[in-house]
Protein backbone atom coordinates (compact mmCIF):
# COMPACT_ATOMS: atom_id res chain seq x y z
CA UNK A 1 0.00 0.00 0.00
CA UNK A 2 1.14 3.52 -0.86
CA UNK A 3 -0.06 6.87 0.37
CA UNK A 4 0.98 10.36 -0.67
CA UNK A 5 1.96 12.58 2.24
CA UNK A 6 1.93 16.29 1.50
CA UNK A 7 4.58 18.16 3.48
CA UNK A 8 7.56 20.39 2.94
CA UNK A 9 9.01 19.44 6.33
CA UNK A 10 11.74 16.79 5.99
CA UNK A 11 11.95 16.02 9.72
CA UNK A 12 8.24 15.38 9.92
CA UNK A 13 8.28 13.19 6.82
CA UNK A 14 11.17 11.07 8.14
CA UNK A 15 9.09 10.24 11.23
CA UNK A 16 5.91 9.54 9.28
CA UNK A 17 7.68 7.32 6.76
CA UNK A 18 9.08 5.13 9.52
CA UNK A 19 5.84 4.87 11.49
CA UNK A 20 3.79 3.93 8.42
CA UNK A 21 6.48 1.53 7.13
CA UNK A 22 6.18 -0.42 10.40
CA UNK A 23 2.61 -1.31 9.44
CA UNK A 24 3.37 -1.96 5.77
CA UNK A 25 2.27 1.37 4.32
CA UNK A 26 4.72 3.20 2.05
CA UNK A 27 4.57 6.98 2.42
CA UNK A 28 5.58 9.03 -0.61
CA UNK A 29 6.43 12.69 -0.04
CA UNK A 30 4.76 15.38 -2.12
CA UNK A 31 6.24 18.79 -1.39
CA UNK A 32 3.40 20.85 -2.86
CA UNK A 33 2.93 23.92 -0.74
CA UNK A 34 -0.75 24.71 -0.21
CA UNK A 35 -1.87 27.90 1.48
CA UNK A 36 -2.84 27.29 5.11
CA UNK A 37 -5.94 28.80 6.63
CA UNK A 38 -5.68 30.48 10.03
CA UNK A 39 -7.63 29.04 12.96
CA UNK A 40 -7.38 28.65 16.73
CA UNK A 41 -6.84 24.91 16.54
CA UNK A 42 -5.08 22.50 14.23
CA UNK A 43 -8.04 20.36 13.10
CA UNK A 44 -9.60 22.84 10.64
CA UNK A 45 -6.16 23.82 9.34
CA UNK A 46 -5.15 20.22 8.62
CA UNK A 47 -8.58 19.42 7.15
CA UNK A 48 -8.52 22.38 4.76
CA UNK A 49 -4.96 21.62 3.63
CA UNK A 50 -5.80 17.97 2.97
CA UNK A 51 -8.91 18.90 1.01
CA UNK A 52 -7.02 21.45 -1.11
CA UNK A 53 -4.23 18.97 -1.86
CA UNK A 54 -6.55 16.04 -2.65
CA UNK A 55 -8.68 18.11 -5.02
CA UNK A 56 -5.61 19.58 -6.70
CA UNK A 57 -3.61 16.35 -7.06
CA UNK A 58 -6.74 14.25 -7.65
CA UNK A 59 -5.47 11.48 -5.40
CA UNK A 60 -6.04 10.57 -1.73
CA UNK A 61 -3.57 12.40 0.54
CA UNK A 62 -2.45 12.72 4.11
CA UNK A 63 -1.27 15.94 5.72
CA UNK A 64 0.07 16.64 9.20
CA UNK A 65 -0.44 19.91 10.99
CA UNK A 66 1.37 20.16 14.30
CA UNK A 67 2.28 22.65 16.97
CA UNK A 68 3.62 23.15 20.47
CA UNK A 69 1.24 24.52 23.11
CA UNK A 70 2.83 26.18 26.15
CA UNK A 71 0.63 26.47 29.24
CA UNK A 72 2.27 29.55 30.76
CA UNK A 73 1.77 31.32 27.42
CA UNK A 74 -1.93 30.33 27.23
CA UNK A 75 -1.25 27.76 24.54
CA UNK A 76 1.00 29.94 22.39
CA UNK A 77 2.42 29.33 19.81
CA UNK A 78 -0.03 26.47 19.01
CA UNK A 79 -1.29 26.98 15.45
CA UNK A 80 1.30 29.73 14.98
CA UNK A 81 4.21 27.36 15.66
CA UNK A 82 5.61 27.53 12.14
CA UNK A 83 5.70 31.32 12.20
CA UNK A 84 7.35 31.33 15.62
CA UNK A 85 9.99 28.81 14.58
CA UNK A 86 10.75 30.74 11.39
CA UNK A 87 10.79 34.23 12.90
CA UNK A 88 11.81 33.77 16.54
CA UNK A 89 13.34 30.33 16.98
CA UNK A 90 14.00 28.31 20.11
CA UNK A 91 16.30 30.86 21.83
CA UNK A 92 13.56 33.48 21.86
CA UNK A 93 10.91 31.02 23.00
CA UNK A 94 13.23 30.21 25.92
CA UNK A 95 13.61 33.93 26.56
CA UNK A 96 9.81 34.31 26.75
CA UNK A 97 9.80 31.48 29.29
CA UNK A 98 12.72 32.83 31.33
CA UNK A 99 10.75 33.76 34.46
CA UNK A 100 8.05 31.11 34.18
CA UNK A 101 8.05 28.36 36.77
CA UNK A 102 5.20 26.47 35.09
CA UNK A 103 7.05 24.74 32.23
CA UNK A 104 4.14 22.52 31.12
CA UNK A 105 3.67 22.13 27.38
CA UNK A 106 2.37 19.65 24.87
CA UNK A 107 2.92 18.83 21.25
CA UNK A 108 -0.13 18.12 19.15
CA UNK A 109 -0.43 16.60 15.70
CA UNK A 110 -3.52 16.48 13.57
CA UNK A 111 -3.33 14.03 10.68
CA UNK A 112 -5.90 14.72 7.97
CA UNK A 113 -6.81 12.22 5.28
CA UNK A 114 -8.78 13.31 2.23
CA UNK A 115 -9.89 11.76 -1.02
CA UNK A 116 -10.68 13.97 -4.03
CA UNK A 117 -14.13 15.57 -3.83
CA UNK A 118 -14.75 14.02 -0.43
CA UNK A 119 -14.72 15.42 3.08
CA UNK A 120 -11.48 15.20 5.07
CA UNK A 121 -11.13 13.04 8.20
CA UNK A 122 -8.89 14.07 11.11
CA UNK A 123 -6.98 12.11 13.76
CA UNK A 124 -5.17 13.83 16.61
CA UNK A 125 -2.49 12.95 19.11
CA UNK A 126 -0.71 14.79 21.90
CA UNK A 127 2.31 14.22 24.11
CA UNK A 128 2.88 16.14 27.33
CA UNK A 129 6.21 17.45 28.50
CA UNK A 130 8.00 20.54 29.76
CA UNK A 131 9.85 23.44 28.21
CA UNK A 132 13.53 22.96 29.00
CA UNK A 133 15.69 25.83 30.27
CA UNK A 134 18.12 25.51 27.38
CA UNK A 135 18.34 23.73 24.05
CA UNK A 136 19.66 20.18 24.42
CA UNK A 137 20.42 17.56 21.78
CA UNK A 138 20.70 17.84 18.05
CA UNK A 139 18.41 15.08 16.86
CA UNK A 140 14.89 15.69 15.62
CA UNK A 141 13.80 19.09 14.33
CA UNK A 142 11.90 22.25 15.19
CA UNK A 143 11.11 22.53 18.89
CA UNK A 144 12.54 19.10 19.77
CA UNK A 145 15.66 20.51 21.53
CA UNK A 146 13.51 22.50 24.00
CA UNK A 147 10.83 19.85 24.67
CA UNK A 148 11.68 17.87 27.77
CA UNK A 149 10.10 14.45 28.12
CA UNK A 150 10.82 12.91 31.54
CA UNK A 151 14.21 14.60 31.88
CA UNK A 152 15.52 14.39 28.35
CA UNK A 153 14.61 16.49 25.35
CA UNK A 154 13.30 15.04 22.12
CA UNK A 155 16.53 16.42 20.65
CA UNK A 156 18.46 14.12 22.98
CA UNK A 157 16.11 11.15 22.76
CA UNK A 158 16.18 10.88 18.96
CA UNK A 159 13.50 9.85 16.51
CA UNK A 160 13.55 6.14 17.21
CA UNK A 161 12.34 6.73 20.76
CA UNK A 162 10.26 9.76 19.82
CA UNK A 163 8.39 7.61 17.31
CA UNK A 164 7.20 5.31 20.10
CA UNK A 165 5.43 7.98 22.18
CA UNK A 166 5.08 11.15 20.13
CA UNK A 167 2.03 13.24 19.27
CA UNK A 168 2.63 12.23 15.62
CA UNK A 169 2.78 8.50 16.46
CA UNK A 170 -0.42 8.74 18.52
CA UNK A 171 -2.27 10.56 15.73
CA UNK A 172 -1.01 8.13 13.08
CA UNK A 173 -2.02 5.16 15.23
CA UNK A 174 -5.61 6.42 15.12
CA UNK A 175 -5.38 6.80 11.35
CA UNK A 176 -3.95 3.27 11.05
CA UNK A 177 -6.79 1.87 13.18
CA UNK A 178 -9.30 3.60 10.91
CA UNK A 179 -7.61 2.35 7.73
CA UNK A 180 -8.02 -1.23 8.96
CA UNK A 181 -11.79 -0.74 9.07
CA UNK A 182 -12.20 0.43 5.46
P1 LIG B 1 4.16 21.25 6.39
O1 LIG B 1 2.97 22.12 6.68
O2 LIG B 1 4.71 21.45 5.02
O3 LIG B 1 3.89 19.81 6.69
P2 LIG B 1 5.42 22.75 8.55
O4 LIG B 1 6.86 22.83 8.98
O5 LIG B 1 4.73 24.01 8.16
O6 LIG B 1 5.35 21.66 7.40
P3 LIG B 1 3.62 22.44 10.84
O7 LIG B 1 2.88 23.68 10.49
O8 LIG B 1 2.83 21.22 11.14
O9 LIG B 1 4.64 22.00 9.69
O10 LIG B 1 4.58 22.66 12.05
C1 LIG B 1 4.54 23.81 12.85
C2 LIG B 1 5.89 24.04 13.44
O11 LIG B 1 6.11 23.10 14.48
C3 LIG B 1 7.04 23.89 12.44
O12 LIG B 1 7.96 24.92 12.70
C4 LIG B 1 7.61 22.53 12.76
O13 LIG B 1 8.99 22.45 12.49
C5 LIG B 1 7.31 22.38 14.26
N1 LIG B 1 7.06 20.99 14.59
C6 LIG B 1 6.08 20.19 14.08
N2 LIG B 1 6.17 18.95 14.57
C7 LIG B 1 7.24 18.95 15.40
C8 LIG B 1 7.87 17.96 16.19
O14 LIG B 1 7.44 16.72 16.20
N3 LIG B 1 8.94 18.31 16.90
C9 LIG B 1 9.40 19.57 16.88
N4 LIG B 1 8.88 20.56 16.16
C10 LIG B 1 7.81 20.25 15.42
NA1 LIG C 1 2.32 23.72 8.07
Image: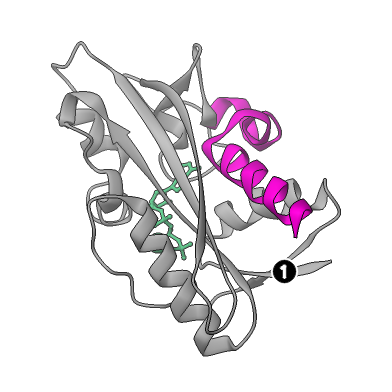
For image coordinates 21% across by 39% down, the residue present is 76
* Crowding near the residue tagged with mark 1, few <14, some 14–19, many ≥20 C-alpha atoms within 10 Å: some
Label 1: which residue? Answer: 3
Q: Quadrant of residue 102?
A: top left
Task: Name above or below for residue 172 compared with residue 61.
Answer: above
Instruction: Between residue 129 and residue 52, name the one nearer to us.
Output: 52
**Where does residue 45 sit, x and y in percent of width and height?**
35, 62
Q: Is residue 32 visible?
A: no
Q: Which residues are magenta?
A: 155-182
For image coordinates 57% across by 43% down, the residue present is 171
Q: Is residue 51 visible?
A: yes
Q: Quadrant of ligand 2?
A: bottom left
Task: Name above or below for residue 12 compared with residue 138.
Answer: below
For image coordinates 78% across by 52% down, the residue present is 180
Instruction: Between residue 129 and residue 62, name the one nearer to us.
Output: 62
Secondary structure state at the residue bearing disc 1: strand
Instruction: Say left or right for 92 vs 48.
Output: left
Amino acid sequence: EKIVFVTGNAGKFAEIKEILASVGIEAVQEKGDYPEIQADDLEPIAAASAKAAADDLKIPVLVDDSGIFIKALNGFPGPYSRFVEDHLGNPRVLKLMENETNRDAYFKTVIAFCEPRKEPLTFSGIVEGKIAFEERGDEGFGFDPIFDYNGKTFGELGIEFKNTISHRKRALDKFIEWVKTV
